[in-house]
Image (cartoon, grey):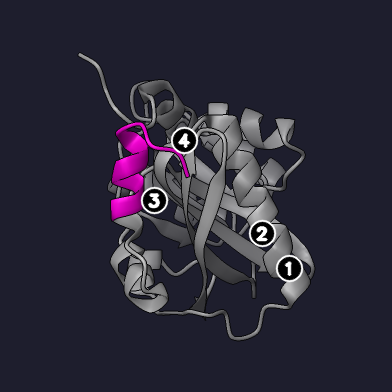
Amino acid sequence: MPIIGTSPDAIDRAEDRERFQHMVERLNLRQPPNATVRSEDEAIRAAAKIGYPLVVRPSYVLGGRAMEIVYQEDELKRYLREAVQVSNDSPVLLDHFLNCAIEMDVDAVCDGTDVVIGAIMQHIEQAGVHSGDSACSLPPYSLPAHIQDEMREQVKKMALELGVVGLMNVQLALQGEDIYVIEVNPRASRTVPFVSKCIGVSLAMIAARVMAGKTL
């Protein structure tokens, strides 16, 4: 069955953390130290290498379900035994938690060749609070112009590398002057209606036309 818009493989490259990590490294972008683990022993070893505190969550989930921040090994063991069933079929993601970082959401539309940035939204809460449970500001209230420009460039690089056709949401974190890629979702995000109202342009309409074959 033909699928319009972003290809299933591009979606998998964004959702599969190992494939996504390879892409981020290829583009010379930063990610918090992270690992995908498939057993408790592997998780303990990876956590020691990455360093606590950690954000832990199952792979391939939406809405921040079963996501926790753990600060020591005992908490990680409890999470693996009580919150999830870690296995080859159900891996768990470990990400180093960025203390006192600022989190941003970026909504964009790509036609496979060109990218339009809809908005950069700055979260009110620190990075680590699930984006669906946090508030954000548009325009950003404390991000310097050069940081915003760098974020736009990074989002464009990832959109083109993935071959996104339609909407894309990127979550970034800023710690000091360093920008970290948290995740990329090649789809419409919960922020699209908010952004569209703020900028006076329907991103969903533009994305639908792009998916139907129009160019930006």
Mark 2 = which residue? Answer: 151
Q: CA distance from mark 2 to mark 1?
A: 6 Å
Tell me the tag on residue 164: 4
**In front of the other: label 3 or label 2?**
2
Q: CA distance from mark 3 to mark 1?
A: 38 Å
- In the image, 130 versus 12, the foreground residue is 12
Q: Is residue 45 visible?
A: no
- Are the residues tagged 2 and 1 within 8 Å (C-beta)? yes
Give amino acid for label 4.
Val
151 in relation to 215, above or below: below
Quadrant into which the N terminus falls:
top left
Residue 141, position as x, y percentages in the image? 59, 86
Disc 4 crowd, CA 10 A, few/some/many (<14, 14-19, 20+): many
Q: Is residue 193 left or right of residue 58?
A: left
Q: Which range is magenta?
A: 205-216
Tell me the tag on residue 147: 1
Disc 2 crowd, CA 10 A, few/some/many (<14, 14-19, 20+): many
Q: CA distance from mark 4 to mark 2?
A: 17 Å
Q: Is residue 19 magenta?
A: no
Give amino acid for label 1.
Ile
Q: CA distance from mark 3 to mark 2?
A: 36 Å
- Are the residues tagged 3 and 1 within 8 Å (C-beta)? no
